[in-house]
């Protein structure tokens, strides 16, 4: 079985990708410092997969410890690099921590990949690199705009690093940059899912926590945008579909089909408003959700959704799970959580 190192594999998207990798016949190996995940995710993975996934509790910025992972694991076919901090607001408060962790860990990883001759990397990028786009939907050729947060800038910088590396003489590392739109939902078993620590910033965890009575009510940030119902438009992609995109990307590299650096939007190609998400959630759960409309949230992009053509044509990747089903899984997961 081909080994794939999954940095951040104990996190939200990483854990679902670990499942998808194992189900596709790979041996995922998690490298995570648990700075934004809990040990309980490993129990969930064990329950789903019926086997133990190897885990290294290592900070990817700690080069000596990370080197120990490469030494211990021997032949590694590829790496998926999820490990990063991702809270937009926090990145404004602690920019240095974000540059250190997100950019620093990529540099350490790339040096180790070169040292150990591991040449396939799939990198977690984000639609945040597009900023406020001039036209919709965004294609991979849509120009990136100045990032609205240090977090967004770390993703742009990491992308630049990977493009520069691809031009360096003698470079053998090939990268696939996946620009995720808004991942939502959980594994159908309800055994792994999104685990925001504290008050969630993201819409869907806030919705499910409100429905569960953990939060008083949801505030819909802005209903005066130039969108069909005035609330923001996003491209909500089911996390299981997103996980599958990683397996397809890894396989493309192992099949020798990938160019030195490739970029793909990973979204559904469809936009939904915040109020549509609320209404769909109410339909799925059969109960009204407490919400009120509030002012716009600083830094929010009014509308963004993917042109998903390149991923379909080049990777053969298409999403399969729609908004309703994705929200149903998020709710199932929420109902299994205890309010700590
Ligand atoms: P997450 O926080 O759930 O997962 C990240 C994991 O990385 C966590 O388990 C954390 O403990 C680990 N980690 C962080 N820094 C580390 C380090 N230095 N060494 C080892 N482990 C470390 O986040 P997620 O939502 O699963 O996001 C995964 C990746 O996808 C991130 O790079 C994120 O920026 C990117 N992304 C996420 C979204 C989203 O909305 N969730 C959208 C676009 C891009
Ligand atoms: C979605 C919509 C909010 C909470 C963020 C990052 C982005 C990417 C994905 C990593 C927006 C509205 C939210 C609430 C609301 N992450 N909302 N009430 O902002 O699209 O993207 O996560 O790369 O970089 O910026 O996601 O889930 O925070 O918000 O009305 O309590 O829901 O205004 O329109 P966002 P989100």
Image (cartoon, rainbow, N blue to C red):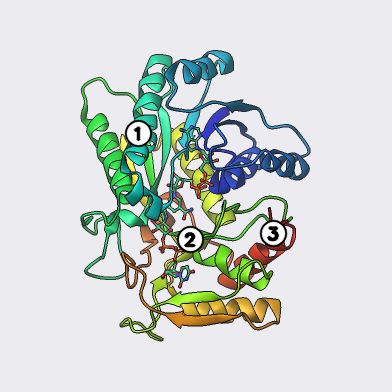
The secondary structure type at the circle numbered 1 is: helix
Q: Is residue 84 above or below residue 236?
A: above
- Left or right, 47 with respect to 322, comes to right
Q: In the rendering, at what x and y percent does residue 254 appear? A: 47, 32
The residue lying at 48 percent from left, 61 percent from top is 201
Q: Is residue 302 above or below residue 8?
A: below
Task: Give the residue pinned by disc 2.
Answer: 201
Quarter of the picture containing the N terminus is: top right
- Left or right, 207 with respect to 286, comes to left
* Mark 3 and mark 1: Cα distance apart in space: 32 Å
Mark 3 or mark 1, which has the lower sequence index?
1
Whether the residues at callouts 3 and 1 have beta carbons within 8 Å, the answer is: no
* Numbered mark located on residue 333 in the image: 3
Mark 1 or mark 2, which has the lower sequence index?
1
Q: Nearer the viewer, mark 3 or mark 2?
A: 2
* Numbered mark located on residue 100 in the image: 1
């Amino acid at each position: 079985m081909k080994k794939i190192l999954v940095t951040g594999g104990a996190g939200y998207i990483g854990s679902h990708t670990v499942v998808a990798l194992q189900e596709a016949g790979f041996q995922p190996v998690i490298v995570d410092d648990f700075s934004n995940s809990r040990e309980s995710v490993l129990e969930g993975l064990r329950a789903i997969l019926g086997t133990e996934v190897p885990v290294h509790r290592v900070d990817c910025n700690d080069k000596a410890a990370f080197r120990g992972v490469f030494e211990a694991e021997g032949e590694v076919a590829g790496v998926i690099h999820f490990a990063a901090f991702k809270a937009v607001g926090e990145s404004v408060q602690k920019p240095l921590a974000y540059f250190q962790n997100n950019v620093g860990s990529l540099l350490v990883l790339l040096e180790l990949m070169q040292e150990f001759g591991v040449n396939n990397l799939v990198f977690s990028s984000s639609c945040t690199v597009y900023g406020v786009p001039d036209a919709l939907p965004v294609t991979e050729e849509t120009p990136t705009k100045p990032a609205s947060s240090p977090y967004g800038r770390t993703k742009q910088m990491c992308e630049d690093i990977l493009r520069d590396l691809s031009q360096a003489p003698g470079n053998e590392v090939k990268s696939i940059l996946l620009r995720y739109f808004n991942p939502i939902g959980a594994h159908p078993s309800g055994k792994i899912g999104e685990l925001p620590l504290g008050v969630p910033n993201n819409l869907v965890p806030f919705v499910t926590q409100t429905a569960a009575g953990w939060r008083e009510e949801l505030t819909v940030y802005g209903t005066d945008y130039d969108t069909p119902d005035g609330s923001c438009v996003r491209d909500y992609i089911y996390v299981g579909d997103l996980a599958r995109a990683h397996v397809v990307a890894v396989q493309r590299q192992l099949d020798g089909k990938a160019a030195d650096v490739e970029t793909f939007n990973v979204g559904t190609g469809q936009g939904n408003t915040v109020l549509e998400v609320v209404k769909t959630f109410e339909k799925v759960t059969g109960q009204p959700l407490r919400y009120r409309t509030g002012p716009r949230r600083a830094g929010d992009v009014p509308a963004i959704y993917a042109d998903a053509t390149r991923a379909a044509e080049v990777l053969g990747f298409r999403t399969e799970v729609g908004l309703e089903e994705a929200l149903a899984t998020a709710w199932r997961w929420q109902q299994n959580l205890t309010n700590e």
